[in-house]
Image (tube, grey):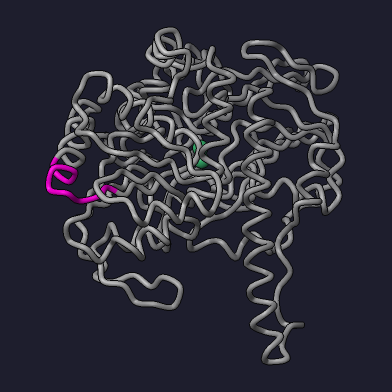
Amino acid sequence: MAYIQSYGAAEVVTGSCHVLHIEKGPVVMVDCGMFQGEHEKENYKKFGFHPRDIDVLLVTHAHLDHVGRIPKLVKEGFRGRIISQRSTFDLMEVVLLDAAHLMEEEYRTLFRKAQRRGEERKVAKPLYTTEDVEAVFDLTSTFAEYGEKIPLAHDVYAIFRNAGHILDSATVQIHYREKNEHRSVVFSGDLGNHNDIVMPDPVQVRKADTLYIESTYGDRNHKPIKESVEEFREVIFNTLMSRGNVIIPSFAIERTQEILCLLKRMYKRKELPPCKIFLDSPMAIRATNLYNKYHSELSRECNLFLKEDGTIFEFPWLHYTLKPEESKKINEEEGCIIIAGSGMCTGGRIMHHFKNRIWNPKNSVIFVGYQANGTPGRRIVDGARTIKIYHEEIRINARIYTINGFSAHADQHELIAWMEGFEQLGKIFLIHGEREKQEIFQKVIRHKMPEHKVHIVKEGEKVWV
Ligand SMILES: [Zn+2]
Ligand SMILES: [Zn+2]
């Protein structure tokens, strides 16, 4: 019999990594992501399997929590084939190089400090380096097209379908034969939200004997997008009109493009007071360029902007600040909107902007993305009075707003609707969610879909399918 083991995103949101063992068939891994927030240390532990034993790696999308451990996987012996959408490879390169760069920089700083104490040997090496990332792209790769049957081995094939979560994100359906019976396993990947401004809706899958579904927001429903857009517009308008600045910590991929699209929409409708907008994140700038390049997979509104202006995201008030000098110059600006990473405020240029502006009550901070447990972003959202930035305790006097309607994830209602859309559905397994939220979701599924068994997957647990 076939079985699946999960080595991440089991009772937690980050670290997605699931391995399907098909009897007398290939060993197929779906995603190999990084743990983030309070689980970060897990990244440095040994894998619970030997990377050499994995034949194929299917990548659902390029978020760090789905691809962040691939260089480690390759470094430790994986030599199989990587299959994903073409643009996912491009985005993945941006994401992984950025991750390696951050870790290398952190290592150098810690090493220098330890050297002064004569303790440099105690400093842990980075999880991987830029060269390790480059090695990932030297392996054999196959570009998947949505809906196409991609052979993995004899009688085993995979189909990618648009998950509507970020650029070219996918749900993956794996078909195989067992005792002359046709079987299929579906991994939802991260499922998109129907209200997404930039992405199309997730495609319905029709058949799965086994479904591994994400449950990030399984416990709740998002506020209607209209309300979120209205709230966003109000905060920006009020802050700019009272000569304050707006700081938006944002994930480089997807959330940033959605915010840019929204600001452009406001600009075109003359709803935005005159201001300068800075996209102060090299990674977000690179990702935005890729969104432009692969525009055909984006929403109708994006393609309309492209038709009207020759560009989806750009408009005269928007400035890309790629170089550090350009970024520093933003400090002299007043009455502006700053979009910077990292999304959960664990580092990056957002910290400089916080240091300069979060103590000032005339400014506003808008959180538009998920804040994992244990991250500075979560502490601010939960009402922390101060934040430590570069060894300095800074007061939080700016107004803090959390607008959740922009989520790139389906909410409870959408997850249920997507599952109800299957014509044939077997057992349901919950992954990619915090335990308490998964328990709530599990109860809802039992109530609404009583004919299905539903189980919360534990790390390392052998699930027979
Ligand atoms: Zn994602
Ligand atoms: Zn995810």
Q: Position of residue 67 (x, y in %)?
A: 64, 42
Please say whether residue 87 is one of the residues in the magenta stretch: no
Q: Position of residue 206 (x, y in %)?
A: 52, 13
**Residue at point 42%, 37% (across, down):** 319
Q: Position of residue 121 (x, y in %)?
A: 77, 82
Can you say whether 39 is above or below 140 in the image? below
Can you say whether 29 is above or below 118 in the image? above
Q: Position of residue 50 (x, y in %)?
A: 82, 51
Can you say whether 41 is above or below 268 in the image? below
Q: Residue furthest bottom?
A: 117
Q: Quadrant of the N terminus?
A: top right
Query: Range of the magenta residues?
Result: 238-246
Q: Quadrant of the C terminus?
A: top right
Residue 435 can be seen, yes or no: no
Q: How many circles with numbers are drawn on the protein?
A: 0
On screen, residue 325 versus residue 77, left or right, reads left
Compare residues 201 and 136 and report the one nearer the observer: 136
Residue 124 sits in quarter: bottom right
Can you say whether 357 is above or below 407 in the image? below
Residue 99 can be seen, yes or no: yes
Residue 356 sits in quarter: bottom left
Compare residues 130 and 190 and report the one nearer the observer: 130
**Residue at point 22%, 28% (across, down):** 224
**Residue at point 41%, 70% (across, down):** 389
Compare residues 132 and 324 and report the one nearer the observer: 324
Compare residues 319 and 416 and report the one nearer the observer: 319
